[in-house]
Image: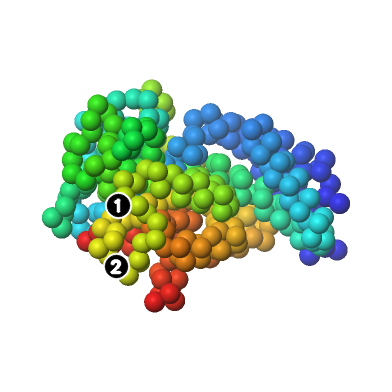
């Protein structure tokens, strides 16, 4: 069985909303794993991967998206953007301020033994190939 | 010893989260990941048009870019784009209100309309919609997400999107309504795609729409159906 107390302790610094989401996903996965008699080591690895992916999706990926928006040709005339009036303006300084956090996260992912496939878990839906097959 | 040491991995994660807790709280307060994904997808669609040789004009508030996060605001106060080329002009808007032929109003994440300045009282109407995208910032997605989108596309698009022949372009003169998801498709989604292909539904699901994927290239191949 998984040491759920250790998991909750590890993710405690995360915002409550995200902790709840991870907990729910984990409990569902544990139930599935029980039914499928998945080996303990595999569930443990999947658990850590799930936590990392939630951190990536919630905090790291939005920083990468912000950067992509800022460097796009479509925004070449404005150095920043807002998501709705009155909200924080996002600019390259925001990206720079969060770069060390992003790099530290990616380093941790590598250290824990997850490869590039961590970011795109399964093959992309390939319509062209499928269309070709159907011709 | 296990081939994966969960205890030390959890310690490493906890140390990481403790080290960056202030920054994480700040990000949680100021950055809404789903909104950021919508903005990223919106800009990626515009970039895809640009890479297809369209001329791109930014419209809306001068000197600043402000993305629209909800349907409840006057659209012209927010940034939108007009793309023109290959004898056609389209307007691309984010979180746009849309009224279908039966006067039902929807909020669509990204709309592409025929021609420019075609909103009526701030709403896009069925005679002007060209195609649209819905954006979902999910780590993993399942067939129910696809099925929801299929239902939406069916009721939003003015013509029938079912039983279209993919090899007969006269049956679909617009890119298929597309679901853009930041995460990966679960294995069941691949079966859903096969079903969609078999039944010839004129929709597309794109996964891994993220800066690490080939977003613009993917969307370019989607748009090139209209050139």
N-term-proximal mark, 1 vs 2:
1
Q: In this view, does B165 lie to the left or right of A76?
A: right
- Are the residues at dot 1 and dot 2 in contact (C-beta closer than 8 Å)? no
Local packing at callout 2 (Cα closer than 10 Å; few below 14, some 14-19, many 20+) is few
Q: Is residue B148 left or right of residue B133?
A: right
Local packing at callout 1 (Cα closer than 10 Å; few below 14, some 14-19, many 20+) is many
Q: In this view, does B33 lie above or below B49?
A: above
Q: How far apart are marks 1 and 2 (CA)?
A: 27 Å
Q: In this view, does B130 lie to the left or right of B133?
A: left
Instruction: Read off the chain for label 2.
Output: B
Name the residue located 67 percent from the left edge and 47 percent from the top edge: A51
Q: Examine the image and state in which quarter residue A119 appears.
A: bottom right
Instruction: Tell me where residue A74 appears, x and y as whole percent.
Output: 27, 46
Q: Examine the image and state in which quarter residue B218 appears.
A: bottom left
Instruction: Tell me where residue B63 appears, x and y as whole percent.
Output: 23, 32
Q: In this view, does A44 lie to the left or right of B145?
A: right
- The quarter of the picture where the N terminus of chain B appears is bottom right
Residue at image mark 2 = B168
Residue B105 visible to the viewer = yes
Q: Is residue A1 above or below residue B58?
A: below
Instruction: Read off the chain for label 1.
Output: B
Q: Is residue B182 above or below residue B59?
A: below
Residue at image mark 1 = B47
Comparing labels 1 and 2, the label whose residue is closer to the camera? 2
**SS type, badge 1:** helix
Instruction: Tell me where residue B50 appears, x and y as whole percent.
Output: 24, 54
The residue positioned farthest toward the top in the image shown:
A86
Name the residue located 46 percent from the left edge and 46 percent from the top edge: B151
């Amino acid at each position: 069985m998984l040491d759920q107390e250790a998991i909750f302790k590890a993710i405690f610094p995360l915002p409550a909303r995200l902790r709840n989401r991870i907990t729910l996903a984990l409990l569902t996965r544990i139930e599935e794993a029980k039914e499928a008699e998945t080996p303990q080591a595999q569930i443990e690895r999947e658990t850590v991967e799930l936590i990392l992916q939630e951190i990536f999706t919630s905090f790291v990926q939005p920083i990468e998206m912000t950067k992509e928006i800022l460097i796009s040709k479509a925004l070449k005339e404005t150095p920043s953007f807002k998501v709705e009036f009155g909200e924080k303006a996002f600019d390259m300084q925001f990206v720079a301020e969060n770069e060390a956090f992003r790099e530290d996260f990616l380093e941790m992912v590598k250290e824990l033994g997850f490869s590039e496939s961590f970011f795109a878990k399964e093959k992309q839906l390939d319509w062209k190939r499928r269309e070709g097959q159907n011709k | 010893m296990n081939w994966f040491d969960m205890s030390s991995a959890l310690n490493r994660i906890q140390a990481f989260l403790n080290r960056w807790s202030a920054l994480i709280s700040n990000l949680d307060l100021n950055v809404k990941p789903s909104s950021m994904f919508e903005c990223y997808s919106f800009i990626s669609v515009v970039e895809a048009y640009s890479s297809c040789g369209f001329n791109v004009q930014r419209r809306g508030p001068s000197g600043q870019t402000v993305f629209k996060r909800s349907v409840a605001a006057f659209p012209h106060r927010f940034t939108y784009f007009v793309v023109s080329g290959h004898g056609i002009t389209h307007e691309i808007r984010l979180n746009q209100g849309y009224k279908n032929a039966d006067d039902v109003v929807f909020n669509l994440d990204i709309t592409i309309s025929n021609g420019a300045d075609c909103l009526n009282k701030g709403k896009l109407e069925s005679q002007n919609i060209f195609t649209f995208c819905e954006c979902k910032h999910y780590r993993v997605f399942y067939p129910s997400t696809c099925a929801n989108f299929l239902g939406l596309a069916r009721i939003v698009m003015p013509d029938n999107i079912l039983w279209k022949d993919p090899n007969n372009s006269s049956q679909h003169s617009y890119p298929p309504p597309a679901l853009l998801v930041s995460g990966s498709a679960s294995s069941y989604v691949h079966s859903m795609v096969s079903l969609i292909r078999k039944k010839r539904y004129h929709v597309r699901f794109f996964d891994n729409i993220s800066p690490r994927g080939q977003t613009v290239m993917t969307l370019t191949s989607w748009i090139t159906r209209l050139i």
